[in-house]
Image: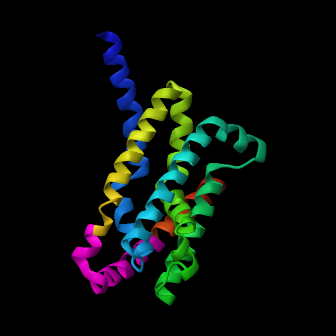
Amino acid sequence: MDKVLQVLQEFGLTFVPLFVAIDAVGVLPILMPLTVNMSSSERGRVIRWAMITALALGLGFMVVGKGIFLFLGIKVADFLIAGGIILFILAAKDIVTGKMVSEQDLAGGGTIGAVPLGTPLIVGPAVLTTLLILVEKYPIYMVIVAFIVNLAIVWLLIAQINRVMKFLGQAGAKVISKIIGLFLAAIAVKMISQGVLEILG
């Protein structure tokens, strides 16, 4: 019984920090401007690529992330700035041109699914940092389970995007996507400023 309680406690202590870092609920509205011009099948393909990218990046980072950071001299602040720049460029492109991604990316689905949805939106600097910290404190198998469960929650939520788009209609979705684009730009600026402050601090 004590062993079961210990396992449940460790799961909770690994699950909750990852849940907060991933912010599964926050991914859904950001997905909308990225996929507003896609069909249901294209949107589904993007989601699959996003989840594959997020899973592969998270698992790979748990195994070799710390060594790569040390070897290349990369800091978490560098990840924040790089991710923020990518998001800001995409948000600015959507606001100015009305399209966050090109027709080629929409046709393939893989590019936008991997970047920026898979990373840095689902698995970004905060998640990677959290994974490194948790692996140092808890058994790696427990961290992996908590990570996969969190990704399953993200998938269940963003899989509902087709219903949301159908409810809003094309015109309504485009209006809301513009508003979200502004928030996405603000999030990008926040990521960049956090990275700069960490470097200066």
**15 relative to 110 in the view: left or right:** left
Q: Residue furthest bottom?
A: 97
Residue 159 figure quarter: bottom left
Q: Can you see residue 123?
A: no
Residue 125 lies, in percent from the top left, at 55, 52
Q: Is residue 158 magenta?
A: no
Q: On screen, 60 above or below 82?
A: above
Q: Main secondary structure of the magenta part?
A: helix
Residue 133 figure quarter: top right
Which of 142 and 165 lies nearest the eye of the viewer?
165
**45 relative to 110 in the view: left or right:** left
Residue 111 lies, in percent from the top left, at 57, 67
Q: On screen, 28 above or below 93?
A: above
Q: Can you see residue 132?
A: yes
Q: How many marks?
A: 0
Residue 83 figure quarter: bottom right
Quadrant where the N terminus is found in the figure: top left
Q: Which residues are magenta?
A: 163-185
Residue located 32% across and 84% down the image:
175
Q: Residue furthest right?
A: 71
Residue 76 lies, in percent from the top left, at 62, 50
Q: On screen, 55 above or below 118?
A: above
Residue located 38% across and 29% down the image:
11
Residue located 58% across and 79% down the image:
104
